[in-house]
Image: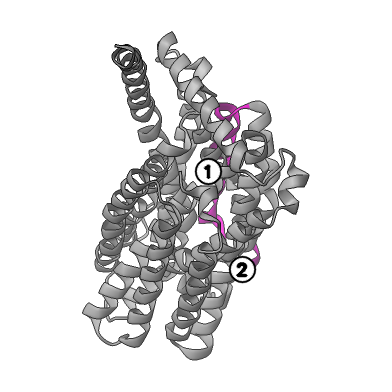
Amino acid sequence: MSNSTTSARAWPATAILDGAYKKASWHLIPFIFVCYLFNYLDRVNVGFAKLEMLDALKLSNTVYGLGAGIFFIGYVLSGVPSNLILHKIGARRWISVMMIAWGALSACTMFVNSPTSFYVVRFFTGVAEAGFFPGMVLYFTHWFPTQKRGQVMALFMSAIPISGLIGGPLSGWMLSHFSVGQGGLAGWQWLFLLQGLPTVLLGAGVFFYLNDGIASAKWLSAEEKSAMEAALAADEQERAAVSTVGQSFGAVLKNSSVWTLGAIYFCIQMGVYAINFWLPSIIKSLGFDNAQTVGWLSAIPYLAAAVFMVWAGRSADKHRERRFHVNLPMVMGLIGLLLAANFSSNTVIVMIGLSMATMGALTALALFWSLPAAFLGSAAAAGGLALINSLGQIAGFVSPFLVGWIKDATKSTDVALYILSSVLLVGAILVLRIPAKLVNR
């Protein structure tokens, strides 16, 4: 009788909590997904603009690689302070400001006319974007406990492959459609303008749509709020029990696990940014000169990645296993890069290799964030997540510049792909050095 009573009492609370999570998922994730989709479009559309921009401005591959990468110098320098500001004034206000700023700067890339102006605009766009992604990771910790976060992060970060799936054909169409120079602008200029302005509008929408936390969500009932807050409190206690990280930013800086995670994230991002910035160029080198054809072909790896990422996120939550769900996609990514490098004259094998590399790297990128979020307490999370993200984003400078320099020197990207696959291997090994008891929940 006692067990029946306990079960009867537990069931409504569980039903209320499940309903609250469903509401929160439908209210938050689709809108934030769209914001992140445009975040990624604004970050990597320079990879498609390159197809015309280099000839128009007489830029070398090395200059392009430096310009693509210098974005991340601004990003890295501003990541931690930006996230600390978000933690202080709330997600709604700060994310709105960031999106309006980076959307306007991205659109202004249409006015660059020299290497210097290209570098300046890219740098300040990186400054403006710096707090968005780690801020969103932090924001989700205010709504969902560790056990729910793998699938939530996978759904949220599926915006990356979807941005490639949509952005590839869309960017290719824009370059082809506007190639005749409507309105006195070249196709690459229209590309920056038309993909930057929607971000400004979304930024304004953030201010009115998002809530800073559970307590301010009018679309949740009082019982749903109580159930979600109790679940977060229990999750916080579990994290505190296994965490080796103190609750100050100084303690975060001294913790070896945080720096190991930063190194792992760097390795993953080396592969991700090589794909993001050079995928159109690699496909074009296979003999496809039409920008629209390149756009459609570049969508194939991103489509495969979108499906695989969501499946892997559900699997990680179901099995309460985090390390191998990051490690194995990284191994998959490095095998894909090796295939693309070893069979560079075979279109079918290169496309299979690029698809494997994209699936592996982007899935590892999404599921990686379940590792630090599982053991960083709420007080340490703002600085810790931003620090890990900033360390990883150094790859955003190194990777495109390295590939551009190697391509200028060797007239091929094959050597760069070998190097990047080695970096992914190092990262995959480092993942296994994270104690399972810290993250497998």
Lateral position of residue 310 relative to residue 91, left or right: left
Q: Earlier in the sequence, mark 2 or mark 1?
A: 2
Q: Which range of residues does the magenta coloring cover?
A: 90-116
Check the image and name the residue furthest to the right.
250
- Residue under the image location 48 percent in, 53 percent down: 368
- Quadrant assignment, res 421: bottom left
Relative height, residue 111 to residue 148 (above, below): below
The crowd level at tag 1 (other Cα within 10 Å; few <14, some 14-19, many 20+) is many
Q: Quadrant of the N terminus?
A: top left
What's the CA distance linking mark 2 and mark 1?
A: 43 Å
* Disc 2 target residue: 115
| Residue type, numbered disc 1 | Ala
Magenta stretch encompasses residue 91 = yes
Magenta stretch encompasses residue 34 = no
Residue 177 location in percent, x, y? 29, 58
Disc 2 or disc 1, which is closer to the eye?
Answer: 1
* Disc 1 target residue: 374
| Residue type, numbered disc 2 | Pro
Lateral position of residue 385 relative to residue 293, left or right: right
Residue 175 location in percent, x, y? 34, 61
Q: Secondary structure at mark 1?
A: helix
